[in-house]
Amino acid sequence: MDKNKKYGLRINRRDLLKWGGAVLVGSGANLTPRPVFSDDTQTAPPCEVPEVVFEPCSGGDAIEVYPTSPLIGGYVDGAGVVRGSVFTDPLIVPPALRPVPISAFGSNPAGPAIGWQSSLGTTHQIWTSDLRLPDPICYRIQLLVRQHYFTSLKALPIDATGNPTIPPRSTNWNPRYLPGSTIYGFNGTFPGPMINALYGYPVLVRFENHLNENPFNLDRNDFGDPLYRFLTHLHNGHTAPESDGNPHATPTGFRPGQYTDNLYLNYPAGNDDREKQAFLWFHDHYEGHTGANVYKGLVGLYPIYDPKLDPGNENDTSNPYNLRLPGVRTDNGDGSFDVAYDIPLAFYDCRLDDGVTQHKDFHNGCGETHPEWWGQTYFRHFPDHGFVGDIFTVNGKAYPVLEVKRRKYRFRLLDASIARAYKFVLMSSTGGPKVAPGVQGQYQLPDGQQSMRFTQIASEGGLLPFPIVRDSFELWPSRRKEVVIDFTRYMDGSPTTKGDEVYLVDILEMPDGRKPDDSSGYRVPVLKFVIGDLAADNSRVPDKLRDLPPIDFTTIDSLPHKSFELQRGGGLDNFFADPVSRIRVVDQRQAVQRVHAARVPAAGKTRSVDGQERRRRLDPSDALPSGGAPDHQKEWCGHHSGQAVRPRRRLRQGRHDLARPGRRGRDLPEFPNVHRQLRGALPQPGARRSLDDVRLEARRPERHNLAVDNP
Ligand SMILES: [Cu+2]
């Protein structure tokens, strides 16, 4: 049964405040979503608010409890001891998604014409020809409701102490195959497809929402956007806002039956080679449900190559700039290409329902249990911090194995987890993995010793200036790192031999969504490499990779400096303790002003947000500014109704352009109208990130905790 369908969208106090509750309650005629048309072009996005159905016990505190997932590969031996065996499922290495002809889009063509950017009637502000780039390579990605299996192994039902337990609706604790978990997947898979992109060759992805269709009649459980909306964000991409999955630009998201064409120009910020990136990912970005929708499967991979330095082909010696990083490229003849020895690794931890753990967070649940969901993914949105799983998966499989050739590989690591941070080490072990039932990660490598090193070549910002040899590195949610591993030798110089096993081990213990700890001796093997045969290897890791653009510190010093003090809620209720709500419930401009008001009065001294300020933010009048609708709601509606069809090039382009104040004049001539617009008013509705936000994001690190509403 589809619970969300039955109850409509449930709402609680938090949501109500976020959306401007008085308005929603007081104008019931607006509450019903518009019917969905697959071809409603040339119309303004509706000033839509979701259907509201109150559920008696929703709202208030989440119950922070975690189920204990069944033990993957677990069994009870003849002496009654819990044992386990994993690392038999092969690591899934996704092939490059294949393009479709632009004619595949039929009666809703893709292109630069007015109203063609999405079924909301929006328009691309810039087209490939404006940058003298070729026509885009087109991809079609459907958002589908499907099933996913995290393992092909049987699993042993266990309780929180790690002891075998008889699950609900069963009479024994025998190992059993897990039911499939319902996912919302790009093209129905988890992770979704991988698009191998190339600088200078734009990509257009048509994302189509089919999430209302449920051809296999799957139970959707109780998380994910209840109205099945989506908004896809190419994380860190240099992308125009209408193609960026920006929730302020498209607050309605895209409903079932609707589509959007995200145009990824694969054009570096400022047309500066030093701004080229190397590994992006795309994920759902729908406001209020981003974490849940990503956890539900909406994850896709987007390595981006550079024809000059990093074309994905170690064998191409005709290009003198080619760094010849590991990778052997095969062109597919349709604009797509695959690269051997260059492998993405998407890390994702999950929980499977044990049937006895209560369900209640600020979206859903009254504390009930769901025995019928035993073995399927369990998710809760905890407002103050993230959700962590106890099963660790890589590319959608728990504890997979990859047979590697004796040569160098490039790995592109993505933390696609909701909140879990990892710290990875390459280890060898004599005793092998040991089962650790009831412990997060389920398996440990107690005698693991570091035996290899990583050579890091890139982070989320692209290639590093020079490679860094690392014993270990951390990976936090949404971040990426790229490493080269040489499987021919151990770190002591001795050669590997066929059949050797090396584990990628996480040593960062993180029992909940708060602070991780790497000092506890925790060692979860997440991926096993088995060394295979020698293979040709023409790759290199040169001493110099890609220069970083210089930072103009004189400009930085002249900018406003803000201070933020992050605090825990302490004795106050969850509502206040949620830093997201603190910003969201008040008008953002007011919030920003208050932050400014709290800024450092004199160098070196930080004034905390005082008690009076805290009380003011808790005051309901803050959440519902005078004059009826909260300002953010007004802006959404006014902005869109007044701009049903946006003139091309009207909106700002690219966070990186904005991000570099000293270089604006150099960057923006490519977007002359944008330049004019920028000189006018900034920020604008729909582009309401502060310059500082943008600037911070443009520099290398970007930390996302997907548990918050809107990363
Ligand atoms: Cu993101």
Image (cartoon, helix red, strand yellow):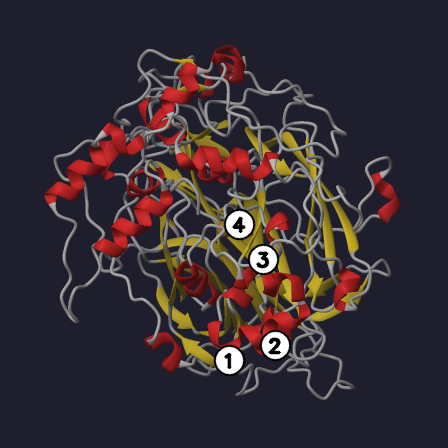
Q: Residue at x 86, y 37 (%)?
A: 106
Residue that mark 3 sits on: 652
Q: Secondary structure at mark 1?
A: loop
| Contact (Cβ within 8 Å) of mark 1 with mark 2 | yes
Looking at the rendered structure, the kind of residue marked 4 is Pro
Give the spatial CA distance, label 3 vs label 1.
22 Å
Q: Secondary structure at mark 4?
A: loop
Identify which residue, 488 or 149, lies in the foreground.
149
Q: Secondary structure at mark 2?
A: loop
Where's residue 559, x and y in %?
A: 35, 70
Q: Which mark is residue 272?
A: 2
Left or right of residue 114, residue 230 in this image: left
| Contact (Cβ within 8 Å) of mark 1 with mark 4 | no
Where's residue 615, x and y in %?
A: 15, 36
Image quadrant in which the N terminus is located: top right
Give the spatial CA distance, label 3 vs label 4.
44 Å
Identify which residue, 578 or 222, lies in the foreground.
578
* Location of residue 272 by image quarter: bottom right
Q: Which mark is residue 400?
A: 4
Q: Residue at x 33, y 18 (%)?
A: 58
| Contact (Cβ within 8 Å) of mark 3 with mark 1 | no
